[in-house]
Image: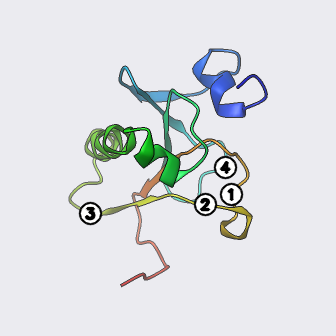
Amino acid sequence: MSDCLFCTIVAGGIPATVVHETPTTLAFRDINPHAPVHVLVIPKEHVEDAAALAQAGLANDVLLAAAAVAAQEGIVESGYRVIFNTGPDAGRTVFHAHAHVLGGTGLSLRLG
């Protein structure tokens, strides 16, 4: 999509600090990090949200890329989060499916 920020990044129209890439995914540092490690993992194909990601058969690719990023960033042993925000109440602002990989410090929000 020409008006999608992440599609423009995939196309090379906006620079990003890329940390990992596969034929179907791109991972780059968040420009407004909420943890020492805050990387976004996106499918190169435009899909709207996490449910569409699964329907397109790309969820596995994104999750494998998120795990590779965690290993590369050295946060596997200490722990990390993979978060998908869906909808405006979740604080989502870019409507292209993306996973946040967060780690490198104790994360304050306990989810179970």
- Residue at numbered disc 1: 92
- Residue at numbered disc 2: 86
Three-letter code, disc 3: Ser
| Circle 1 Cα neighbour tier, 10 Å, few/some/many (<14 / 14–19 / ≥20) | some
Q: Are marks 4 and 2 in contact (CB under 8 Å)?
A: no
Between the residue at mark 2 and the residue at mark 3, the CA separation in whole angstroms equals 27 Å
Residue 25 position in % (x across, y down): 42, 30
Q: Look at the picture and state if 87 lies above or below 3.
A: below
- Residue at numbered disc 4: 32
What colouring does the structure picture have?
rainbow
Between the residue at mark 3 and the residue at mark 1, the CA separation in whole angstroms equals 27 Å
- Residue at numbered disc 3: 78
Residue 111 position in % (x across, y down): 42, 81
Between the residue at mark 4 and the residue at mark 1, the CA separation in whole angstroms equals 13 Å
User: Marks 4 and 2: which is nearer the front?
Assistant: 2
Residue at far top of view? 12
Q: Look at the picture and state if 7 lies above or below 29.
A: above
Q: Look at the picture and state if 100 lies above or below 5.
A: below
Residue 74 position in % (x across, y down): 28, 47
In this picture, residue 66 sits left or right of residue 34: left
Residue at far left of view? 77
Residue at far front of view? 55
User: Marks 2 and 3: which is nearer the front?
Assistant: 2
Query: Of label 4 and label 2, which has the lower sequence position?
Result: 4
Query: Of label 3 and label 4, which has the lower sequence position?
Result: 4
User: Does dot 4 land on a helix, a strand or a loop?
Assistant: loop
Three-letter code, disc 1: Arg
In this picture, residue 4 sits left or right of residue 74: right
